[in-house]
Image: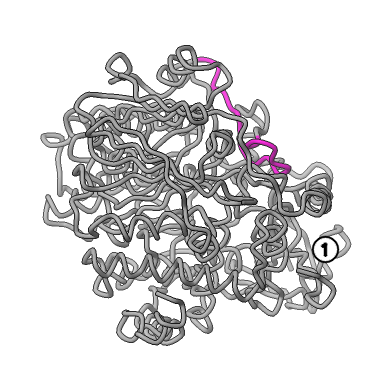
Amino acid sequence: MYGWHGRLLRVDLTHQKVSIEPIAPQVLKDYIGGRGLAIRYLYDEVNPQVDPLSPDNKLIFTTGPLTATTAPTGNRYMVVTKSPLTGALAHSNSGGDFPTWMKRSGFDMYIFEGRAESPVYVWVNEDDVQIRSAEHLWGKEVPETTDALLAETHPEAKVACIGPAGENLALMSAIMNDKHRAAARSGVGAVMGSKNLKAVVAMGKKNPAFYDDAGMRALSVELSKEVGVDVKKGSNLRIYGTAYVPQVTNALGILPTRNFQAGTFEGVDKIDGVALKNTYLITHKPCYRCPISCGRLTEVPEGKYAGKGEGPEYETIASLGSACGVDDLAGLLKANYRCNELGLDTISTGLTIAAAMEMYEKGIITEEQTGMPLRFGDADAVIEMVNRIGYRQGFGAILAEGSYRLGERYDHPEMSITARKQEFPGYDPRGSQGMGLLYATSNKGASHMEGDVAYEEVFGVPVKSDPLSTEGKAELVARFQDAFALIDSGGICVFFAIRYVFTKERMVWPIRLTQLLNLTTGANYTPEEAMQAAERVYTLERMFLLKAGSGPEQDTLSPRLLHEPLPDGPAKGRVVDLDKMLPEYYAYRNWPRGVPAPEKLAALGL
Amino acid sequence: MRVRVKLIANYMKLLPPGTKGNTFELEVAPGVTIGDVLGPLGVPLDDSTVLLLNGYQVEADALLSEQDMITAFSAIAGGDRSLSQPDAQKITM
């Protein structure tokens, strides 16, 4: 077999049993790998109505056929499970080094099931797979855990682990790899914690051969050069990382500010990529072999915010920064470092704190509940709340449940800015209408990683699309969702892949991606077949949601976005016109009333 | 009339020398377009640039008015440029 290993590792934590199973070639071809392969298994093996934090849920790590290949950015893995935050699907994506090391351990996928009696970690060194005690690591933060595991396994291995937040079942806890990288969203860390699984350590030298080795290497060189030319010309992602984006979203009036009460932030110049470059940036830091290198290595050398780590990227600036009204870059960096060390998703953490701040300022909650003043702009309060969430201390125990449950608890659910109970990323959809439809229909709840039409609405790629218009957005969102399913199933990064997915006519026509998949696997996809596989993946995910009880009634947004016009900026006066776009979306997908039509399922082989 | 010009991130290198921050003001005559202002600075006026006039997406031929705010930044995709999708006919799968 080429491209894929064609086998998975199954770890039964309840019975401390490890098994290796083949994966049928037809399943690999039909679902590509990564996210697609994982949903096929999750759908078949897990009752969608299961309690996400019970032993009956399964936690899947998966790579794609392009992971650990010469394809530029071929270094992503996905964590797929039922989400305890949304009650829907979690598919969280991460880079760093771990994905390549996982693939080289000789498996396309790890499935963790059951629950260990006491804390364990799993050490995968090719076919030598050990379930080891992690009692001595329980309670330790991510950097310390990672260092300890490298010392007791192999210095060249790579670690994915949870911090205290995952152990404490915080619903916005992440799985951290290589210390600073996160499969962040939807509470995947809590699922890992619920299984008493502290970490997974991987290494190996088993990589599947390419179907056409010379062809794959030649195309990889060609594509690397194409990216390299742009990078050398002065790529924003290389120079500033995604941290340059706040200036763009602020100009469009869609930078989340004080819990989405405004779309422009007066402090933006103090927390953007230019400010970062002029102060705490040490250097850019790529994922393994990435030619783009958007990662930031930063350090606050002294003072109460002293720390060092990776970040912030755009989403973190929007959530822990402008959404909390924070314009102190050092304080924002400290909050970012603490999220990484505790193992927390910066988006949901920041937005939950932002919701609490709005509730505090409006008198819905008081210091009696919160234990301290929670005012917008107070970086120290943000950092303190991050710590309390991670350790579930005091008011942090309530915040650890996310903003939706926070709002419900105090009879003000409208304070939570969520879709499917998951907090929004950094684009106010009132000024980016397609993003509104995207958040409302996303299988994983509000997310920018499941069909980010901000590429068109905000960044003009591949073509510009008016962010304030609803025209054509139904089709645009559906196409982007399918394209992202292809990218996530392939095992590469969207920052690279996006330029090879769409033509200027906005047709999804993944020629380069199909070539890469074919040279790697020999599966001989046509671009149409590749896109059909992507739609199959997306639709099967939707079927999982329907069975989980997260169906069409959940295809909506928090009331603020639908009823409260933006008070400032270019999108002033606008709400999300979801009522117009949603029926068009269902029609385009052939999902009558939000449910895939039988003939649609049949056409996709579902 | 006075207008303001904001050039974001890697376009900051095109700002007039001595500009503080990413924004400068200038005097323009009535009838002048965004392209007339940005072209001489070296801002690409093709698909690789996103242009905003007071926060709204526009093309380079948009006319300017008193107190307008022009914003320009490069379209991104794994580098800066928008896509480099090859011609389907010339590719063997």
Residue A9 at x, y percent in the picture: 42, 40
Task: Specify whether A354 is left or right of A7.
Answer: left
Identify the main secondary structure in magenta. Answer: loop
Whether residue A448 is visible to the viewer of this picture, yes or no, is no
Left or right of residue A42: residue A147: right
Q: Residue at x 44, y 76 (%)?
A: A605
Q: Can you tell which quarter of the image residue A444 is in?
A: bottom left
Q: Residue at x 55, y 16 (%)?
A: A155
Q: Is residue A358 above or below residue A541?
A: above
The residue depicted at 28 percent of the width and 39 percent of the height is A190
- Boundaries of the magenta span: A286-302
Disc 1: CA contacts within 10 A as few (<14), some (14-19) or many (>=20): some
* x, y percent for residue A475: 51, 80
Quarter of the rendering occupied by the C terminus of chain A:
bottom left
Task: Name the foreground residue: A457 vs A286.
Answer: A286
Apparent side of residue B38 relative to residue A331 in the rendered image (left or right): right
Residue B18 position (above or below residue A511): above
Q: To which residue does mark 1 refer?
A: B44
